[in-house]
Image (cartoon, rainbow, N blue to C red):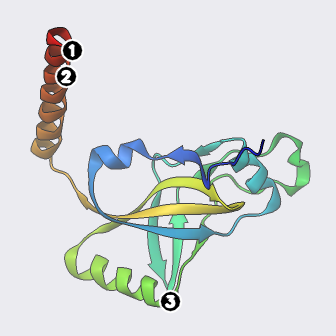
Amino acid sequence: MIVQKPQEQAVATNRKAYHDYFVLEEIEAGIVLCGTEVKSVRQGKVNLKDAWCNIRDGEIFVNGMHISPYEQGNIFNRDPLRVRKLLMHRREIMRLFGITRQQGLTLVPLSVYFNKGKAKVKVGLCKGKKLYDKRDVQADRDAKRSIERAMKERG
């Protein structure tokens, strides 16, 4: 019997991004990592909480993504908060650059996962939420929860 592994193996998600932003579009990008960073990512030691992306000189970089040092890495470990380059087609990068400049949107890494053995980052094109937007989302969530509870009791 052959057991197939799922294609995408999620390592870390940025739940704070979904709380603070409306995600308008999601784009997959590769990420440049060194060997010990890949091993640490496979162990799930990634924090995307305060991470953001920016575009410089036609290249896209992720800042603030914390990858903990690998325990057996000794001298080969890199700085946990170093700026890491993302791999995307130039046309996609230029399109994102134009959208972020004109409409005032933000690029936020949403998740890190492995796809066919390669580390990938899902980058979201996001618009910031106001406080009343966050309250509306919370109220909707509470209403759905109470409806589900009532349906469960009834049926």
Q: Are marks 3 and 1 in contact (CB under 8 Å)?
A: no
* Place of residue 113 in the rendered image (x, y in percent of width and height, measured from the top left): 59, 54
Q: Position of residue 149 (x, y in %)?
A: 19, 16
Badge 3 local density, few (<14 within 10 Å), some, or many (20+)?
A: few
Badge 1 is on which residue? 152
Q: What kind of element bears circle 3?
A: helix
Horizontal side of residue 30 vs 137, given as left or right: right
**Disc on res. 144:** none
Q: Quadrant of the N terminus?
A: top right
Quarter-of-image position of residue 45: top right
Q: Are marks 2 and 3 in contact (CB under 8 Å)?
A: no
Q: Amino acid at mark 3?
A: Arg
- Could you tell me which secondary element the residue under label 1 belongs to? helix
Identify residue for label 2. 148
- What's the mark number on residue 90? 3
Asked if 115 appears above or below 47 in the picture, the reply is: below
Report whether residue 141 is seen.
yes
Q: Is residue 154 above or below residue 106?
A: above
Q: Nearer the viewer, residue 56 or 6?
A: 6
Q: Is residue 27 above or below residue 93?
A: above
Secondary structure of residue under mark 2: helix
For this view, does 8 lie left or right of residue 36?
left
Residue 57 seen by the camera: no
Question: Crowding near pointer 1: few (<14 within 10 Å), some, many (20+)?
Answer: few
Disc 2 versus disc 3: distance between alpha carbons? Answer: 46 Å
What residue is shown at x 19% (from left), y 22% (from top)? Answer: 148
Residue at the image point whose x is 48% and y is 61% from the top: 122
Q: Position of residue 119 (x, y in %)?
A: 66, 61
Tell me which numbered mark, 3 or 1, is placed earlier along the sequence.
3
- C-alpha separation, residue under disc 3 versus residue under disc 1: 51 Å
Q: Amino acid at mark 1?
A: Lys
